[in-house]
Amino acid sequence: MKTCILSPTQILEKTDDSIINSVEKTVKETIEKYNLITQTDKVIVAVSGGKDSTTLLHILNKLGYKIEAFTVDVHIGCYTEQNLANVKQLCEKESVKLHVFSFRKTYGHSICHARDTLNSKGVNVNSCTVCGVMRRRMFNIIAKKTGATKMATGHNLDDEAQSILMNIFKNRTTLNARISPLQQLKNTDMVPRIKPLFFVTEDEIIQYSKARKFFVHYGRCPCSVTSLRSAVRDFLNECKQLNPNATQNIMNFFMKNKQHFCKKQHKEIQTCANCGQPTVSLTCRTCELLQQIKMPAQSI
Ligand code: SF4
Ligand SMILES: [Zn+2]
């Protein structure tokens, strides 16, 4: 198959119809090339009310796959209230069943409160670490609870290029072995994760979402300002001012050389001694954080 990647320069010249066709074609080709979804799969789509997951849900639905959606309300004021309203409207319009879960109900506190409590106990974590780690655990449980055989997330090419750089910055390059449109962890019963937007750039998704007139929030999460991802995203956006193909080139280089970089695989996946979720240590990071914060995890 030819490369899925288009340059933003080409994209900027596209009409509404052509951006719609090219994004949908790239997603379809990615699904087929990586065998992400079969006709017997039940796919649970993680939706947030943002442009990426809205685009993902719409395209998977249009392609006729058997899908349901879920969202985790992380209680970040007006930002999540508006997103939740958008998600409900989207699923109603697309006639897709929506499951709503609450971070606060599951863990007993909002993200900001959990972060503040951890910080006050000397644990230096930002909102995105708390949110990312603890939501990831919820995702695994939700996928099984809904009987899904695949879980789809709206990660785009820019997100993945950021992850590659972040792993390099943190000297955790073996984690790059997991960067792929299909993430299927060996020795676990984790529902495989798929990323059908893996080869679609953020610029393309913005244009697609606007062409489709999706009712979504284009701004950033107010809690993202302190994260490393946010700093890397800003850095890459600056690079794209100088070279519009910067993120595509990072991804092309990575995909071509992935086997070489990822020879030394990441640690074996085990199950957390406390909650049974996948982890590389004795206990998972969520259980570690909960222990530090001294709050028991409730069932979802
Ligand atoms: S930006 Fe950070 S805090 Fe906000 S939703 Fe994403 S991971 Fe959570
Ligand atoms: Zn655990």
Image: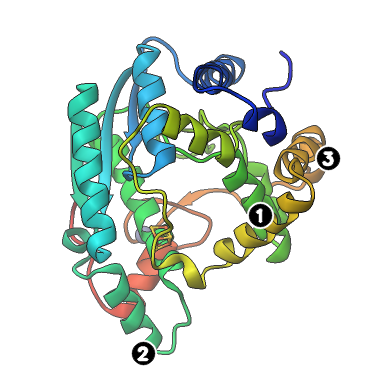
Q: Which residue is mark 3?
A: 260
Please identify the quarter of the rendering in which residue 180 is found: top right
Identify the residue at horizontal 39%, vertical 66% (top origin): 222
Is 145 on the left or on the right of 185, as rendered?
left
Residue 56: quadrant of the picture = top left
Disc number for residue 237: 1
Q: Which mark, by number, is residue 120?
A: 2
Q: Are marks 2 and 3 in contact (CB under 8 Å)?
A: no
Q: Say if 108 sits above or below 180 in the image.
A: below
Local secondary structure at mark 3: helix
Say above or below: 51 vs 115: above
Residue type at mark 1 is Asn
Give me the C-alpha separation between circle 3 and circle 1.
27 Å
Colour mode?
A: rainbow
Query: Distance between the Cα atoms at labels 2 and 3?
Result: 43 Å
Q: Crowding near pointer 2: few (<14 within 10 Å), some, many (20+)?
A: few
Q: Is mark 2 within 8 Å of ligand 1?
A: no
Look at discs 2 and 3 and give the one toward the viewer. 2
- Above or below for 118 versus 212: below
Q: Nearer the viewer, mark 3 or mark 1?
A: 1
